[in-house]
C-alpha cells in the first residue's frame, strides 16, 4: 500500500462535504478543521449528532454508569430500566480493580437491573425499584447503592431520587440516584457531568479523616483500563506521592469520601472529570493540574510538574531519580522499536482525551498523527480552556444540571496562597489550565470532531495510515480496508499503556501491528502475475 | 447467599438481551438493508458494540438520535431526518426501522411517520421501509428477531404461482450454520430462500474495495417470492405461529426443532427427503454414520456426566435433546425468555429417557448459580456469560450460541446437522477429557 505523506487535506474535505445534503454539509464543515497553528482556530464540538449519521458516540447512561461509576468496586449499581442497557454495560469497559483481600467487596462483575416490563411502563416502576434496592441490600449488605435511570424512567416520571432518599433512611447506608436517561445531552459526555455532580453531592467530603503521608494527591479521570491505574500507583508511590483517591479506576467509596483531604488534584481525562476538580477547588480549596501519563516523556514531565507544585527538594530529587531509572528501560525498548516505526502515519479518533494523549506515544515512536478528533469532546478539549467564556450554552447542555458550589465554611483550606500560585505560574507551571488537542497538532493536519462512518472511510482512503486508533465498533471495518486498528477503549485486551511500563507495552504493540506481514497475503497467487510453480521430475 | 426458593423482583446477571438487538441481526441478513433504531443513539451504539464483539465484523446500525425535545414532543422529525440521511449515504434497498423503549414509551406512531415521509418524498427513489415494534421491556432479543422476520414477510411477500422453492427460517443460528444449511439444500437439489441470511455479512473476508453495506443476505426479490414457496421450514420448538409466509398464502409449514443431535437432524433430513423426493445424499449418510460411531467411541468419557444448558430457549431445547442422546444428564435447562413452552417440551424429552430435568424459564444467572450449587454439574453448555459461574464452580464451559466474546470465531461455531453435532460432540468430549487430565495427580497422557 502506498502511503500518503501528508499533503493539504483541502480537496478531501471538499469532497467529503460535497456528498452531504447542503444542511448537513454546512454543519459538518464547522467540525472539520485543517490545522493552522498561526491562526486562532475554532471547531464545532459537543453538538448533537445528525439523525441517521452513524456515529461513534454513546449516551448519557453509558457515560454515567459505564464510564465514571462503573470502575468503583464497592457500590452496587442498579440499572433502573428494561434489560438491554444493564446487559450491554456489564463489564464491557475492562476496568480492573483490586479488592482488599479475598473477602473484599467487588460488585463490578455483577449486573443488577430492575428489568422493567410492560406493566412497569404503564403503572410506574417505583415499587420495583424499591424492592430491587431492598434485595440488593439483603443479599450483600453493601456500603452504598446507586441507581441509574434509562430512557423510559424519565418519561414515565419515576422519582428515583425520592426513592433513593427513602431507602437511604430505611437501610442506613448511602443510596443515591442518577437521572442519566440516554436522551440527555448529545453524547456520553452528559453522563460524565451527571456522574460528577452525583458523586460530589452524595459522597465527596463524607469522611474527614486525615490520612498519613506527604504530598497528597487525587488522580482524576483515570479509569484503570487494562491496569493503567496499577502502573500509575506504582510510579506515584516510588516518586513519594500519597494517593488519596482515584476517580475512578481501582477505587472504592471510602476513598471518594475522603478525597477532599488531598492537596492537589491531577487530571488525566479533562473531559470526563474537570467538573469534579473545579467543584473541589471551589468548595475545599484544592488546586488542579492537567497531567498526561500516556507516553514516557509525558509521564516524566507530569511527575516533574507535580513535584514543582509541592516544591519540596527531597521530592524533586526522588522524582528525578525515578525518571532516570525508568527511562533506562524505556529507551532500551525504544531503540529497538523506533527504527521500525519511524515516519509512519497514525489516525486517532477516540474519547475525550485519548485522541490527544496518545499522540505523545506516537511522537516517541517517531510516528506522525495526521488526523485526529474526539468522540465526545467539547471545544475546550480542542482549543484549550481559554475558550470557555466563548462557548454558547445550547439547549442540550442546559438540561444538564450545573451544581451551585460555595466555599465550605469549615473545611475550605487554600493549599497555596494566591501569591504562591502566581509565583508557580510565572515559573511556567500551568495550574488549572489545559491547552487542548489542537495545540498538539501540526500545520495541515486534520482535526475532525465526532467523525462519521463515511468520513472515516474517505479519510482512510486519503491518508492510507499505518495505524488507526478507535474502538471496537470501528475495528473490523477499518481492518477490512487493510489498516490495523488499535482499540484505545479496551486496548484490545492488552495494556497497561500508561506510565513507563505502559509506554514500553505500547511501543512493542504498535511495532508488531504496523510491521505485520499479514496484509501481504491478501491477494491470492492466482490473482497475481507470478512465476508458475514448477514440478521436478523424479523416478517413482 | 442467594437462596434457591426466593423469587427475586430484580434481575441479577441477566440471561437475555433486548429486542432491538434481535431486529438488528435480522436486517444484517437482508441484502442491501440497513437497520435504523428509532430512539436514543446509545441503543445503536451498545448493540453495535455487542454484536461486533461476537462476530468481529463491521456492524452498522443507524439511529434517529433522540434529544430531550424529541422525547417530549415525539420523534417524527428525527425519524424522517434519519431516513433521509441513511438513504442518501448508504443507498439501501431496505431500511428496517426498529423501535426502542424510548419511542415506544412515548407512543410514537411510527407507521404514520413513515407514510408521511413517503408522501413528502413521493416521486423520488425511496428504499423499502419496514417497521417493527421492538420495545425492550417486552420479551427478549429473540422476540425482536422473530418479529422482524415476520415484519419482512408480512410487508414484502406476495402470492402467485407455486414454485418448488423452500422457504427456510433458521432462527438465530451462526453464519457457519447458515452456510452448512445452504450446502445441504444444494445437495438435495432443492431451491431455497433463507431468511435471514447473514452468513456472508457477519463472517466475510477482507475487502478489496470498500463496501458501504457488506455483500450478502436474502434479496428483496427472494423475500417477495416467499409467498409462492412449495413449503416453509422453520426451526424452533417454541414457535407457535412462526414468521413464515404460511399464514397468508397457505404454504405448508414444517416447524422443526433446531437440528442438533441425531434425532432432530434426522427429522430435518427426512423432511428434505420428502420435499425433494430424493434419496439422502451419500455425504450426509456418511456424516451421520461417523457421528454415531463417535458416540459409541466416546460414550465412556461422558456417560452420566451432569450438565447445565442455558441460553435462548430453542437452542437450549435442541441442545438438551442432543445431550440426552449422548448420555449426558442435563440437570438444569435455563433461559431468560419465557415463552411458556420450554418446560413442557424438555420435560417430555427427559421423560423419554427416564430423566426428570429441572427447567427454569425467565431465569437469570443468579438463579442458575443457586441451583448449580445444589446440582453440582460437571460442565456447562452456553454462551460466554456463563463464564463467571463456571469459574466459581471450577467446571468447564463449552461455548455455543451468542454471545461468545471471550473466544475467537463466534460466527464460525457450527451447531446444526450431523456435521455441527459432530463438532459439538468432539468439543464436549475433549473438554471433559482435558478437565480430567488437568486434574489428574499423575498426569496421564493416554486417556
Image (spheres, helix red, strand yellow):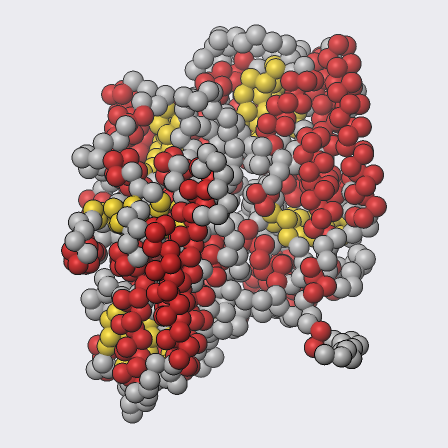
Q: Which residue sits at x=17%, y=49%?
A: B356
The relative height of residue B382 versus residue B109 in the rendered view (above or below) is: above
Q: Which residue sits at x=34%, y=55%?
A: B299
How many numbered badges does the structure rendering display?
0
The relative height of residue B226 versus residue A288 in the rendered view (above or below) is: below
> Quick check: A53 left or right of A37?
left
The relative height of residue B442 versus residue A464 in the rendered view (above or below) is: above
Q: Quadrant of residue B315?
A: bottom left
Give coordinates of residue B105: x percent, y percent.
29, 52
Q: Nearer the viewer, residue B263 or A361?
A: B263
Give coordinates of residue A169: x percent, y percent.
27, 20
Q: Farthest residue in the bottom direction? A: B161
Instruction: Inspect this view and state whether residue A389 appears.
Output: no
Q: Nearer the viewer, residue A171 or B3?
A: B3
The relative height of residue B53 versus residue A147 in the rendered view (above or below) is: below
Q: Farthest residue in the front direction? A: A540
Give coordinates of residue A253: x percent, y percent.
44, 22
Q: Nearer the viewer, residue B184 or A513?
A: B184
Instruction: Inspect this view and state whether residue A463 appears.
Output: yes
Quadrant where the image shows the N terminus of chain B: top left
Q: Nearer the viewer, residue A272 or B18?
A: B18
Q: Which residue sits at x=42%, y=81%?
A: B186
Q: Which residue sits at x=19%, y=34%?
A: B6
Give coordinates of residue B119: x percent, y percent.
38, 75
> Quick check: A441 left or right of A215?
right
Amino acid at each position: 500500500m502506498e502511503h500518503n505523506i501528508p499533503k493539504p487535506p483541502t480537496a478531501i474535505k471538499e469532497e467529503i462535504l460535497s456528498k452531504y445534503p447542503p444542511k448537513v454539509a454546512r454543519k459538518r464543515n464547522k467540525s472539520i478543521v485543517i490545522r493552522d497553528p498561526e491562526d486562532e482556530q475554532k471547531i464545532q464540538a459537543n453538538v448533537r449528532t445528525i439523525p441517521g449519521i452513524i456515529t461513534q458516540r454513546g449516551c448519557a447512561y453509558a457515560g454515567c454508569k459505564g464510564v465514571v461509576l462503573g470502575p468503583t468496586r464497592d457500590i452496587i449499581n442498579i440499572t433502573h430500566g428494561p434489560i438491554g442497557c444493564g446487559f450491554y454495560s456489564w463489564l464491557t469497559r475492562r476496568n480492573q480493580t483490586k479488592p482488599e483481600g479475598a473477602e473484599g467487596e467487588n460488585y463490578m462483575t455483577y449486573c443488577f437491573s430492575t428489568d422493567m416490563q410492560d406493566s412497569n411502563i404503564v403503572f410506574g416502576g417505583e415499587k420495583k425499584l424499591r424492592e430491587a434496592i431492598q434485595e440488593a441490600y439483603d443479599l450483600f449488605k453493601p456500603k452504598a447503592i446507586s441507581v441509574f435511570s434509562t430512557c423510559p424512567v424519565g418519561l414515565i416520571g419515576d422519582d428515583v431520587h425520592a426513592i433513593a432518599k427513602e431507602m437511604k433512611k430505611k437501610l442506613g447506608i448511602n443510596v443515591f440516584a442518577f437521572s442519566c436517561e440516554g436522551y440527555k445531552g448529545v453524547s456520553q459526555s452528559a453522563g460524565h457531568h451527571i456522574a460528577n455532580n452525583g458523586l460530589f453531592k452524595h459522597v465527596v467530603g463524607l469522611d474527614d479523616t486525615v490520612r498519613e503521608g506527604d504530598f497528597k494527591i487525587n488522580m482524576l479521570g483515570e479509569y484503570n483500563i487494562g491496569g493503567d491505574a496499577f502502573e500509575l500507583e506504582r510510579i506515584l508511590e516510588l516518586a513519594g506521592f500519597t494517593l488519596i483517591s482515584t476517580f475512578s479506576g481501582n477505587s472504592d467509596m471510602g476513598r471518594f469520601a475522603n478525597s477532599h483531604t488531598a492537596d492537589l488534584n491531577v487530571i488525566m481525562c479533562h473531559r470526563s472529570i474537570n467538573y469534579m476538580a473545579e467543584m473541589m477547588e471551589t468548595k475545599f480549596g484544592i488546586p488542579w493540574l492537567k497531567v498526561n501519563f500516556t507516553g514516557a516523556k509525558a509521564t516524566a514531565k507530569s511527575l516533574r510538574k507535580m513535584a514543582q507544585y509541592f516544591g519540596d527538594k527531597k521530592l524533586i530529587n526522588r522524582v528525578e531519580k525515578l525518571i532516570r531509572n525508568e527511562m533506562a528501560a524505556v529507551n532500551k525498548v525504544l531503540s529497538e522499536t523506533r527504527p521500525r516505526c519511524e515516519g509512519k502515519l497514525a489516525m486517532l479518533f477516540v474519547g475525550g482525551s485519548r485522541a490527544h494523549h496518545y499522540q505523545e506515544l506516537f511522537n516517541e515512536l517517531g510516528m506522525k498523527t495526521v488526523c485526529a478528533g474526539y468522540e465526545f469532546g467539547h471545544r475546550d478539549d480542542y482549543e484549550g480552556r481559554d475558550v470557555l467564556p466563548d462557548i454558547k450554552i445550547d439547549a442540550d447542555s442546559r438540561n444538564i444540571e450545573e451544581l451551585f458550589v460555595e466555599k465550605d465554611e469549615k473545611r475550605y483550606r487554600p493549599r497555596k496562597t494566591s501569591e504562591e500560585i502566581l509565583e508557580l505560574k510565572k515559573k511556567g507551571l500551568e495550574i488549572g489550565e489545559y491547552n487542548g488537542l489542537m495545540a498538539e497538532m501540526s500545520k495541515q493536519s486534520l482535526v475532525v470532531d465526532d467523525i462519521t462512518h463515511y468520513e472515516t472511510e474517505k479519510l482512510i482512503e486519503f491518508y492510507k495510515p499505518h495505524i488507526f486508533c478507535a474502538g471496537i465498533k470501528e475495528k473490523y471495518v477499518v481492518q477490512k480496508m487493510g489498516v490495523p486498528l488499535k482499540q484505545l477503549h479496551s486496548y484490545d485486551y492488552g495494556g497497561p499503556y500508561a506510565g513507563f511500563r505502559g509506554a514500553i507495552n505500547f511501543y512493542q504493540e504498535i511495532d508488531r501491528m504496523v510491521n505485520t506481514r499479514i496484509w501481504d497475503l491478501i491477494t491470492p497467487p492466482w490473482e497475481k502475475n507470478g512465476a508458475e510453480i514448477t514440478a521436478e521430475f523424479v523416478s517413482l | 447467599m442467594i437462596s434457591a426458593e426466593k423469587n427475586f423482583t430484580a434481575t441479577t446477571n441477566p440471561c437475555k438481551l433486548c429486542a432491538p438487538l434481535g431486529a438488528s441481526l435480522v436486517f444484517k441478513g437482508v441484502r442491501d438493508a440497513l437497520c435504523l433504531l428509532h430512539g436514543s443513539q446509545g441503543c445503536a451504539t451498545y448493540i453495535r458494540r455487542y454484536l461486533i464483539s461476537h462476530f468481529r465484523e463491521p456492524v452498522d446500525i443507524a439511529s434517529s438520535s433522540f434529544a430531550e425535545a424529541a422525547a417530549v414532543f415525539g420523534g417524527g422529525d428525527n425519524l424522517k431526518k434519519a431516513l433521509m440521511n441513511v438513504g442518501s449515504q448508504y443507498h439501501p434497498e431496505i431500511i428496517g426501522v426498529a423501535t426502542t423503549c424510548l419511542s415506544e414509551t412515548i407512543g410514537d406512531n411510527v407507521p404514520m411517520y413513515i407514510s408521511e415521509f413517503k408522501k413528502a418524498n413521493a416521486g423520488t427513489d425511496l428504499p423499502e421501509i419496514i417497521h417493527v415494534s421492538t420495545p425492550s421491556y417486552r420479551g427478549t432479543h429473540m422476540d425482536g428477531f422473530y418479529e422482524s422476520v415476520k415484519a419482512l414477510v408480512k410487508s414484502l411477500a406476495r402470492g402467485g404461482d407455486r414454485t418448488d422453492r423452500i422457504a427456510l427460517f433458521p432462527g438465530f443460528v451462526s453464519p457457519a450454520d447458515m452456510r452448512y444449511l445452504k450446502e445441504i439444500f444444494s445437495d438435495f437439489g432443492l431451491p431455497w430462500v433463507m431468511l435471514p441470511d447473514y452468513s456472508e455479512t457477519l463472517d466475510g473476508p477482507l475487502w478489496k474495495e470498500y463496501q458501504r453495506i457488506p455483500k450478502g443476505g436474502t434479496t428483496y426479490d427472494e423475500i417477495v417470492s416467499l409467498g409462492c414457496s412449495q413449503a416453509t421450514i422453520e426451526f424452533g420448538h417454541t414457535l407457535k405461529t412462526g414468521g413464515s409466509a404460511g399464514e397468508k398464502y397457505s404454504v405448508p409449514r414444517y416447524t422443526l426443532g433446531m437440528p442438533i443431535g441425531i434425532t432432530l437432524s434426522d427429522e430435518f433430513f427426512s423432511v428434505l427427503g420428502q420435499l425433494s423426493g430424493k434419496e439422502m445424499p451419500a455425504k450426509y449418510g456418511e456424516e451421520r454414520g461417523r457421528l454415531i460411531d463417535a458416540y459409541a467411541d466416546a460414550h465412556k468419557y461422558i456417560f452420566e456426566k451432569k450438565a447445565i444448558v442455558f441460553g435462548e430457549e430453542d437452542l437450549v431445547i435442541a441442545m438438551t435433546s442432543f445431550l440426552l442422546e449422548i448420555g449426558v444428564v442435563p440437570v438444569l435447562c435455563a433461559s431468560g425468555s419465557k415463552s411458556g413452552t420450554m418446560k413442557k417440551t424438555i420435560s417430555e424429552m427427559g421423560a423419554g429417557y427416564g430423566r426428570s430435568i429441572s427447567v427454569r424459564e425467565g431465569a437469570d444467572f443468579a438463579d442458575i448459580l443457586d441451583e448449580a450449587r445444589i446440582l453440582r454439574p460437571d460442565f456447562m453448555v452456553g454462551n460466554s456469560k456463563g463464564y463467571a459461574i463456571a469459574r466459581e464452580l471450577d467446571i468447564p464451559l463449552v461455548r455455543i450460541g451468542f454471545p461468545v466474546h471471550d473466544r475467537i470465531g463466534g460466527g464460525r461455531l457450527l451447531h446444526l446437522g450431523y456435521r455441527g453435532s459432530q463438532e459439538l460432540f468432539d468439543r464436549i468430549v475433549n473438554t471433559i477429557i482435558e478437565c480430567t487430565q488437568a486434574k489428574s495427580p499423575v498426569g496421564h497422557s493416554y486417556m
